[in-house]
Image (spheres, helix red, strand yellow):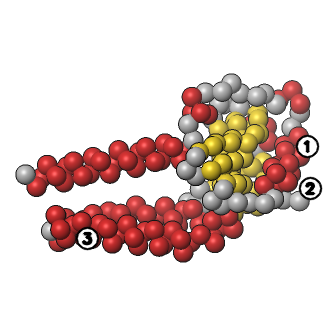
Amino acid sequence: MNELIFRGKDLYGHAKYTRLALLGALLVVQVAFGAYRLGAVATCWMVGATLAVAAPLALMVQRSWSRVGADGVTVCWGLGRGRTHSWQDISWVDVRETKSRQYGNSRAARIFLADGRRRSLPGLQDSTTYPRPDFDADVQRLLDWWEHSTHQDTRIQPARKLRDRLSPTVVGVLAGIVIAVASFVVIAAQQH
């Protein structure tokens, strides 16, 4: 079987300019709000903090990848050379599907390790926003590798947990809202 490589830049590359436009709009809002309420120094800190968080995250998304081969599954989230999980360490492979009214459906292939940890595979994802037409075929190719490389007795489906019900998008949006509200509360408290 051929080695499989799934790269984040192939999945998200076409949306690079959309993300840049959204970041630009956010920075314009921050500068306008900052000039009106905060002053030059606080505005510079706010814009700098936004860029300090957004730039590395965007770079990591572009550099993320997964490789499936004879030695197992290698996952790299954009930093370093990635981590290889041998086939003997992988107890289950499945697709996590999340549904959202705002963002539509998204699916991500993931592996479950024998010690209970789970890893989503960067680049092997499909969503309404970032469609991957060959997602089902690629997941089947991953499953073929897994079934070919492991014994049936070692394939154990894990029990569902609370985090299986919460999507990373929901957690991220909630964390973003909490951070934004806390930031504005702190800024408003300093103004009085």
- Residue 109 place in picture, x, y as percent: 72, 47
Q: Is residue 49 left or right of residue 148?
A: left
SS class, disc 1: helix
Looking at this rendering, what residue extends furthest in the front direction?
101
Q: Residue at x 29, y 48 (%)?
A: 181
| CB atoms of marks 1 and 2 within 8 Å | yes
Give the mark, 3 or 1, whose residue is nearer the N terminus.
3
Q: Is residue 50 left or right of residue 132?
A: left
Q: Quadrant of the N terminus?
A: bottom right
Q: In the image shown, does 169 or 68 lie closer to the viewer? A: 169
In whole angstroms, how far apart are the C-alphas of marks 3 and 2? 56 Å
- Residue 81 place in picture, x, y as percent: 63, 60
Q: Is any atom of residue 83 visible in this view?
A: no
Q: Nearer the viewer, mark 3 or mark 2?
A: 3
Give the mark, 1 or 2, whose residue is nearer the N terminus.
2
Give the mark, 3 or 2, whose residue is nearer the N terminus.
2
Q: Residue at x 48, y 72 (%)?
A: 20
In the rendered image, which residue does mark 1 sit on? 148
In the rendered image, which residue does mark 2 sit on? 1
Q: How many other residues sit within 10 Å of disc 1, few (<14), some (14-19) or many (≥20)?
A: few
- Residue 40 place in picture, x, y as percent: 17, 71
- Image quarter of residue 76: bottom right
Q: Is residue 81 left or right of residue 132?
A: left
Identify residue type, mark 2: Met
Q: In the image shown, does 146 or 54 lie closer to the viewer? A: 54
Q: Is residue 30 left or right of residue 100?
A: left
Q: How many other residues sit within 10 Å of disc 2, few (<14), some (14-19) or many (≥20)?
A: few
Marker disc for residue 32: 3
